[in-house]
Amino acid sequence: MTGAVWARTLTSGAVKGEGKSVTDSAGGRTEEKEIMSNWKVAPAKVAKEDGADWNWRCFRPWEAYKADLSVDLKKHHVPATLSDKIAYWMVKILRLPTDVFFQRRYGCRAMMLETVAAVPGMVGGMLLHCKSLRRFEHSGGWIKTLLEEAENERMHLMTFMEVAQPKWYERALVFAVQGIFFNAYFMGYLISPKMAHRVVGYLEEEAIHSYTEFLKELDKGNIKNVPAPAIAIDYWRLLPDSTIRDVVMVVRADEAHHRDINHFASDIHYQGHELKESPAPLGYH
Ligand SMILES: [Fe+2]
Ligand SMILES: [Fe+2]
């Protein structure tokens, strides 16, 4: 972020906490109940450039960015080694059930897949964090880079859930898939970070493909091009009259950046090095 000055003020005195909705069991009536605390850890009050209140607790203006839409969407890592080929075909096979389950419901598909996409960065970041502690060594910025990826993916989810509400059986599916995928990726990363990053690189290539299909359906008019959710406008610094098409464009650009980071990480391992030996691409969106 350059040039922008954000107004920040801290609340003083007795700390006012977050408003909390409570339900009256008698009538189902809701009322705001204030959380009181003497710990003086009130969050900073943040305003937008125009002075209006900043509405989001999950991210701050200085974490918002303009997506780099010039990123090459067609870049592909041609599987060369046996482990590359296994990673590639694993992802291709995993795509089959999602194609059957979601078919052309791309909004729903995006929302569901983002619940999975936000896992690898957190698992990889956590394992590198533990490794840094165990070995008394720096990570080269890779912990932060992978956690940035996880947070970015979670913001994709926070955006898409504004336009596609999950049904009960989809929530159940997410619950089950997360339980399996988290543990599988955790074990996979311990055994071979090289292959784990390659798998994510290929998953991101598939994500780019899915969002390209999403755009085609929007352009054909098969999916309504609704206004962009407010959270997306602030997170990607979009114009106020942006639509879901603009959101898909920036999300797809994010996925291309994740693809590059993960293939790069795998290449570092492939060449017999550790991630910390190469500076991490921090802030690469
Ligand atoms: Fe994503
Ligand atoms: Fe991604």
Image (cartoon, rainbow, N blue to C red):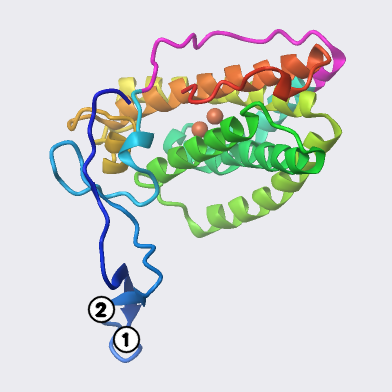
In this rendering, does residue 170 appear at all? yes
Q: Camera-side residue: 231 or 34?
A: 34
For the point 72% across and 19% down, the residue is 277
Image coords of residue 167 (percent x, y): 47, 55
Q: Is residue 211 visible?
A: no
Q: Is residue 46 above or below residue 220?
A: below
Report crowding for label 1: few under 14, some 14 to 19, many 20 or more residues within 10 A (C-alpha): few
Could you say where residue 108 lies in the image, as x and y percent from the top left? 46, 41
In the picture, the disc for residue 24 is 1
Would you say the magenta stretch is mainly helix, strand or loop? loop
- Quadrant containing ligand 2: top right
Image quarter of the N terminus: top left
Front residue of 202/277: it is 277
Q: Give the total number of marks visible in the rendering.
A: 2
Which residue is label 2 attached to? 31
Quarter of the image for residue 200 reads top right
Label 2 and label 1: CA atoms lie apart by 8 Å
Q: Position of residue 19 (x, y in %)?
A: 30, 69
- Is 281 situated left or right of 63 in this image? right
Are the residues at dot 2 and dot 1 in contact (C-beta closer than 8 Å)? Answer: yes
Label 2 residue SS: strand
Residue 276 horizontal side relative to residue 279, left or right: right
Determine the secondary structure under disc 1.
loop
* Residue 35 location (% of width, % of height): 35, 75
Of labels 2 and 1, the one closer to you = 2
Mark 2 residue type: Glu
Q: Residue 147 falls in which quadrant of the image? A: top right
Residue name at image x 63 percent, y 41 percent: 122
Q: Which residues are magenta?
A: 67-86
Residue at figure coordinates x 26%, y 28% from the top left: 238
Q: Is residue 206 left or right of residue 274?
A: left
